[in-house]
Image (cartoon, rainbow, N blue to C red):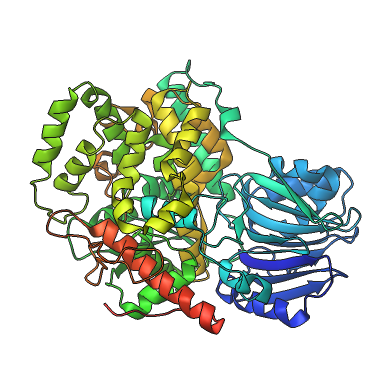
Amino acid sequence: MCGFCGWVDRRGTFRAELLQAMTDAIIHRGPDASGHQFGPKWAMGHRRLSIIDLAQGQQPMTDSSGNWIVFNGEIYNFLELRTELIGLGQALYTHSDTEVILAAYREWGAESLKRFNGMFAFALWDEAAQRLFIARDRVGKKPFYYALDPDFMVYGSEIKSLMTVPELAKGAEVDLESLYDYLSVGYILEPKSILKNLKKLPAAHFGFYDPKTGTLDIKPYWDLKDQYQKAHWHKTTAQLQEELLALFEDSVKIRLRADVPLGGFLSGGLDSSSVFIMMDRLGIRQKTAFCIGFEQSSFDESLFAAQVAQKVGAQITYGLYQEPGRAQMAKLVWQMDEPFADNSSLPSLQLTGLARKGVTVALSGDGADELLAGYPTYQADRYYQAYAQVPGALQGLFKKAAGLLKPSYQKLSFDYKLKKFLGAGGLSAPMAHYHWRSLFEPQDLSQLLRPEVQAQIWDYRTQDRFQDYYNQVGHWDQLDQHLYVDMRTWLVDDILFKVDRMSMANSLEVRSPFMDYRFIEFCFNLPPHQKQQGKNQKRLLRSSMAPYLPESAVTRPKKGFSTPKLEQGSLKPVESEFFQSHFALDPAQEDVTYKAYNLTILNIWLTMFERFKKTGKWEPVEIPN
């Protein structure tokens, strides 16, 4: 687990000290070692968090062909690939998964990506072809930013690294479509970033940069649409349970490969508990668990975590969530680099910090909700099918009546969910699902954004991106459509973004067994009723794990990992060229928890960015309450 950076400069004018600055900016991603390598017109930098082959896995790494690579992530099936490659005549000298990537590229070229089971982003200089090969894993667990100029390409794991490059820093501007994304849903849809001159390599894509022509050719190598075959619809529940258990057990097994201490996150919910059950089935005797509790009972799950820990014989370490101060909020925003409004980032940062005190690798239950319909939004989708038949006039009366409810500020309170549900009245099923996940609605943004900003955005709307994804799978079952769209948006740009940034902030590697591509394909080929039937969500996973878990882990509803309302949350945006000065949230009329958090993060980020443009320093900036 690491961070990397580099460039290909057609002019050959970039300097060695620049690479040092780029790698220093991401030392948190790899505190154990650093490395640099220079070619005639290219350079690579690396920060290493040592996990596999501690002695010989240094990067940048080269091979006998003169190829060089910088790599962030883990190839979980590297042992199997290593054996296969040696059988094909490839010479390998280390036990590092990085060397396996180099050998796989020599043997299979870009087709090697389809053989990798892991989380990864890397850049590989192909000496014979004199071009750069870049790639990112299937679901986008590891980040890859790049900037393309007529004279050069610069790339790296984080924005702060790229902003040490003067040519990029000078041209940095806020991307207004990305700003619209952020205000609408709390995150930014790939391939955009918050800055106009930086892009993200999309998940499940690779590319070749040719310095002779200055062009970057990007292509997909995997698409979940191609895996949707309804292959399991004829099988019995017992058969599917057997397959799920075997596949998930292997997914956990290969993620236990490490040469450093390893543990896991445990909330006592179905997903994280399932990971520990599999660790127990695999005979792991020393199981180390970490859990963050809350003083507010509606947010706390620590008692349930204790029940599971006792069941599987895990030693559990608890931490108590602490309301962040201004300095901590500034550091949080700096760590993320982009505005990002998932307030579970706060306990996630504290959880990864707690875990890093005891282990270097932690397994998590991320991804199961997106695969098997675990969120309350999927229940709302089901209810909405009936509600859409109610006459529009009556829907309007319901919505007006719900508006009279005063906000309770409980975790996902009834009043919040009711207002959100009724607010979707008159929308199509896809746009209702988008509405459940949205923050500021278009009518809000027309009041928040300056007219000139709206004119520059013109006809861009975040919901149109979601609708485009729905259109691609419009012939699927409705539930599978929602799951597919969430995989392409919410999962990669919110959930996995958060996991990477918050774990790397504490130099901790997080592995997610549910994100094994084999398990993803298995779940998308399940009949919908095995995912959701009535109020039973993640149905097949629940029935498969029920014999092994405490009843509370199987039957209680999902609580999620959000936080109470920030005491210092912003009700207005900072003064800037983007916002109208009269806009303000009213906490007495609506639950402003998520909107206020959105504005809080954005205000800190904009203040940090304005300071950066004046000083050239990308660093945390505190703002007054």
Left or right: 470 as drawn, with respect to 573: right
Q: Name above or below for residue 293 compared with residue 515.
A: below
Q: Nearer the viewer, residue 116 or 37?
A: 37
Q: Is residue 257 visible?
A: yes
Q: Quadrant of the N terminus?
A: bottom right
Q: Residue at x 50, y 67 (%)?
A: 337
Q: Residue 69, located in which quarter of the rendered image? A: bottom right
Q: Nearer the viewer, residue 232 or 202?
A: 202
Whole-percent x, y for residue 311 in the image: 32, 50
Q: Residue at x 81, y 45 (%)?
A: 109
Left or right: 249 as drawn, with respect to 200: left
Whole-percent x, y for residue 229 in the image: 56, 22
Left or right: 586 as drawn, with respect to 326: left
Q: Name above or below for residue 394 compared with residue 443.
A: above
The residue lying furthest to the top in this view is 234
Q: Residue at x 40, y 35 (%)?
A: 372
Whole-percent x, y for residue 306 in the image: 28, 57
Question: How many circles with numbers are drawn on the protein?
Answer: 0
Q: Is residue 265 visible?
A: no
Q: Residue at x 22, y 49 (%)?
A: 412
Whole-percent x, y for residue 291 in the image: 34, 62
Q: Name above or below for residue 228 compared with residue 577.
A: above
Q: Quadrant of the C terminus?
A: bottom left
Q: Name above or below for residue 482 compared with residue 367.
A: above
